[in-house]
Amino acid sequence: MIRVLFICHGNICRSPMAEFILKDMVNNLGLSDQFEIASAATSAEEIWNGIGNPVYPPARTELAKHGIYCEGKRAVQMKASDYDKYDYLIGMDSMNIRNMERITGHKKGDKIYKLLEFAGLEADCRDPWYTSRFDETYRDVVTGCTAFLECLQKEGKIC
């Protein structure tokens, strides 16, 4: 079982997009039973009285344009114990990476990655919260998730 946790600041845009895009990809490849895929936030800003906000409506709309649905997903906050639970903790940008390192007490490289690194890029996944360009974020996430699966295949972790 390959356990993947995608992380962004609030867990309402980029990381849930990545969660559901990768779930769709592995489902289409017939590999769903080999993966556990989730997403979380480095902050509690989108969590009120223990209940997380749902995926931001424009992010849901962008996913739906591609036949991907994320109904029922609510923001959750990353915990230090996630480092032991997951094989890959994948952040969307450099600030997420710093916060992930702070939360887990571990450094980038062991299990902590930035999504677009899998595609050989140093770039951050664009944050649609500031740009309103959910289409660009979608493309960034697809690029990163596709490259991630290719890396797993090259490493012999999936067929």
Image (spheres, rainbow, N blue to C red):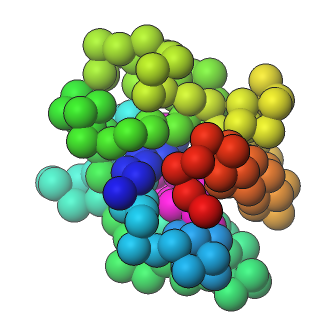
**Who is closer to the viewer here, 27 or 122?**
27
- Residue at 29% of width from left, 21% of height from top? 104
Provide the residue span drawn in magenta: 9-22
Image: 127 above or below 136 = above
Pinpoint residue 72: horizontal percent, then vertical percent: 36, 79
* SS assignment for the magenta stretch, majority: helix
**Left or right of 97: which side holds 2?**
left
Q: Is residue 18 magenta?
A: yes
Query: Is residue 80 something one can see in this rendering?
Result: yes
> Magenta stretch containing residue 57, yes or no?
no
Q: Which quarter of the image is occupied by the C terminus?
A: bottom right
Q: Position of residue 102 (x, y in %)?
A: 35, 15
Residue 2 percent coordinates (x, y): 41, 53
Seen at 63% across and 81% down, the residue is 28
Looking at the figure, which quarter contains the N terminus?
Answer: bottom left
Residue drawn where x is 24% and y is 42% of the image: 85
Up-down: is 106 above or below 30? above
Q: Nearer the viewer, residue 147 or 130?
A: 147
